[in-house]
Amino acid sequence: MVHVIDGPNHEFAMRILDARRNAKLTQEDVANRLGIDVRNISMYENGRQFPREGMVAKIAQVLNVDATWLATGNTQDTLSYLDQQRAKIPKIATKISLLYVQEWDKIWQAPKLVYNESPSNERQSADLDRFVPFAENFFGRHTAVRYPGTKPDNAAYPAGCIVIFEAAPHTADVIPNGADVIFRQRGAENEAGLRRLVREPGLPTAMLVPLDSAAPFSPIPFDSLNIEIIGVVVQRVIDHRSGQSF
């Protein structure tokens, strides 16, 4: 019997499916141990649903796997190692790259175009208006995206500005306090958000707070099992053709 994965959480679906099979458990076994309906397990393994709140950790315990790996595809040790390697690389620009400016709703997809003065295929373009120059370092993996803005507009991120972010796995511990981050809640595909990561003395976890302190939105506790950091903002550009930035 072929297992069909047709939902947006396909990577998570593959991990939970493989982990369940390696544990030699049926969907019913897992559901019974968790005290939930077997249809939930089926939805997870089809990629149509992502577990909410603390359910990922409970599933990982039943399947005897690392919860961070189950949620993200990386173990906590791997993420920490990447953080350490990133910290060793001097923050010195080594090359000027032309980053393709993606649309906000395509933020988690690989960039569609690369710049080439003489395009030879559909993945290349000579149209400079579709790119923004950026000085990268050796370890950097940066992405540019056009921010759609908010209502009312945020002064720091006006609608249409270009946001350049480091698109790499990050743990909350190494993200600078006060850094702006692009994130999404796991399972809420196509709903990327932009907030500021803040660590308050006495609180056990970092919080994602609205950029505008007057905005009517509650802070979100950062939990890597439920929150995915898509990237850390490194630059904002108002008009990339004139080079005006802020």
Image (cartoon, rainbow, N blue to C red):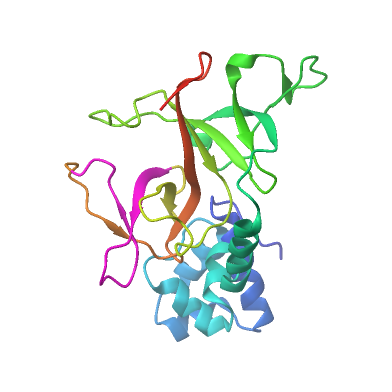
Q: Which residues are magenta?
A: 191-213
Q: Quadrant of residue 149?
A: top left
Q: Can you say whether 242 is above or below 184 in the image?
A: above
Tell how many labels: 0
Q: Can you say whether 78 is above or below 66 in the image?
A: above
Picture quarter with the C terminus: top left
Percent coordinates x, y for residue 202 in the rendering: 25, 72
Percent coordinates x, y for residue 200 in the rendering: 27, 63
Could you tell me if residue 169 is visible in this image? yes
Percent coordinates x, y for residue 130 in the rendering: 59, 19
Describe residue 148's horizontal placement relative to residue 166 as left or right: left
Q: Main secondary structure of the magenta part?
A: loop
The residue depicted at 54 percent of the width and 55 percent of the height is 9
Nearer to me, 216 or 205? 205
Describe residue 147's horizontal placement relative to residue 216 as left or right: right
**Magenta stretch containing residue 201, yes or no?**
yes
Q: Can you say whether 165 is above or below 15 in the image?
A: above
Percent coordinates x, y for residue 41 in the rendering: 50, 70
The residue depicted at 47 percent of the width and 53 percent of the height is 229
Nearer to me, 15 or 141? 141
The residue depicted at 70 percent of the width and 38 percent of the height is 94
The residue depicted at 26 percent of the width and 55 percent of the height is 219
Q: Can you say whether 240 is above or below 50 in the image?
A: above
**Magenta stretch containing residue 31, yes or no?**
no
Q: Quadrant of residue 22?
A: bottom right
Describe residue 199's horizontal placement relative to residue 60 as left or right: left
Picture quarter with the N terminus: bottom right
